[in-house]
Image (cartoon, rainbow, N blue to C red):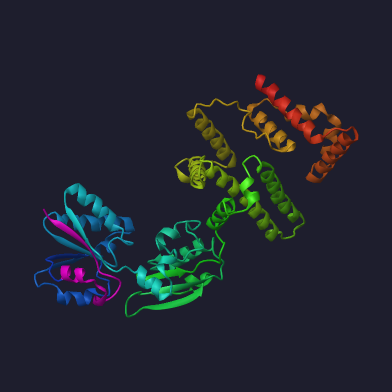
Amino acid sequence: MSTLTLLGLGPGDLDSLILAAWRTLTTCRHLILRTARHPCVAALRDHLPADCVVVTCDDLYEQHAAFADVYAAVVARVLEAAATGDVVYAVPGHPHVGEATTPQLLAQAAAQGITVQTVDGLSFVEPAFAAVGVDLMDGAQVLDAMLLARQHYPQIDPCLPLLLAQVYARWLASDVKLTLLAAYPAEHPVTLVHAAGTAQQRTVSLPLAELDHRDDFDHLTSLYAPPLPQYSSYSALLELVAHLRAPEGCPWDREQTLETLRKDLLDEAAEVLEAIDLEADGRDNSHHIAEELGDLTLVVTMMAQIAQEEGRFQVGDIMRDVVTKLIRRHPHVFGDVQVGGVDHVLANWDAIKAQEKAAAGVQPHPLDGIPAALPALEKARKLQSKAAKLGIFDRVAAAQTHPKLADLLAAQPDADRLGALLWQLVALAREHDLDAEDALRQFVVLQRARWQEE
């Protein structure tokens, strides 16, 4: 049975090869290089056995436009050779670090009965972090630049050191920059690490916003982004809330329950709305809005922590459920469904929600789905909207029920006039010792019950 050896060439010249790799290379008879564009390859050829067959896969990069097709072709070439005898397949760095062909080779070789062994190599990771003076044990993150460039928001923790591998072109650096700008400020200092671990190693520091203002990118270029200031990520808030709820934490926070936080949730949501409303006069209230959103997020995080402590669910369950639901309810974005506009999107959304409930064995009434805790005006609006979709609410007939009120609004149909009319109704209710909020809430409940009976 033949053996396929996956071997790491390290990041630089021959001196970066480990002894096991050197012994394997200087005794092999069939060597396949994923690429000859590696600092040690030229010198290595002088030390290979005279009868060693050397094949490179650089030609496959020219034959295929997509990297996925290139890697598939490389895997096919390697396995075809391994089926007839022992083969050493050498790749830059370490075979199990940033090497897309390795998982495919392992899976397909196992299916074909080919034995696979690994000879380690020093990856680019260690010398790249060393070049910027960062200890890997500080919680570093390593990601392929192509993977991050396809994201709209970087799926990383910005409070930890980040290393992006293979920023090989200016267009890729531009895409990477746009993604990172969603989490880092434009002036955030980043460092380009060129040829880490080689004699040509050099670093260039610059603001994130200027990342794609250069042309010296190649396959040995990595990008290092230092962490944001402490407490700049959601994970920091999760840790803080868990600490507050711990035995050594805060007595008030430890006493809270899902029930006691209900009012805080509504209050903080209302304060967010108020902060947004303060921009009505054209004034920028961004800092205040951010502060109130932080308070609202704190309450949500506290409730999630309490649920986790009670064994109900974890934050990961919340995130997975909502992301999965959003993907399922947006088939026009994540699937092949075609839509003709917003109305079509909303119709699809309602249909998908109905399918979800039917699959769960729930037979809801079309007027269901209105939270009881909503303010009365919003409850009334939602109920009327649902009833209108069902054809049981006639706006014209409703207006004609109170022709004077309709005339008042028709004379000045804008938000200011409507607000004034509602204000007067609240004042009228107060004069008669009535609570307008409670009155409307009760009427909504009664109207909904009437419609459900029809």
Of 65 and 134, nearer the camera is 134
Q: Is residue 243 left or right of residue 29?
A: right
Q: Is residue 403 above or below residue 287?
A: above
Q: Quadrant of residue 388?
A: top right
As for residue 329 lying within the magenta part, the answer is: no
As for residue 12 lying within the magenta part, the answer is: yes
- The percent position of residue 314, horizontal first and vertical second, equals 50, 45
Residue reaching furthest to the top = 454
Of 299 and 51, nearer the camera is 299
- The percent position of residue 130, horizontal first and vertical second, equals 39, 74
- The percent position of residue 335, horizontal first and vertical second, equals 45, 43
Residue sitting at 73 percent across and 56 percent down? Answer: 279
Q: Is residue 294 above or below residue 94?
A: above
Residue reaching furthest to the front = 248
Q: Is residue 432 left or right of residue 229?
A: right
Q: Quadrant of the C terminus?
A: top right
Residue 273 in view here: yes
Residue 81 in view here: no
Residue sitting at 59 percent across and 45 percent down? Answer: 303
Q: Quadrant of residue 281?
A: bottom right
Q: Quadrant of residue 423?
A: top right
In the image, the segment drawn in magenta is: 1-25
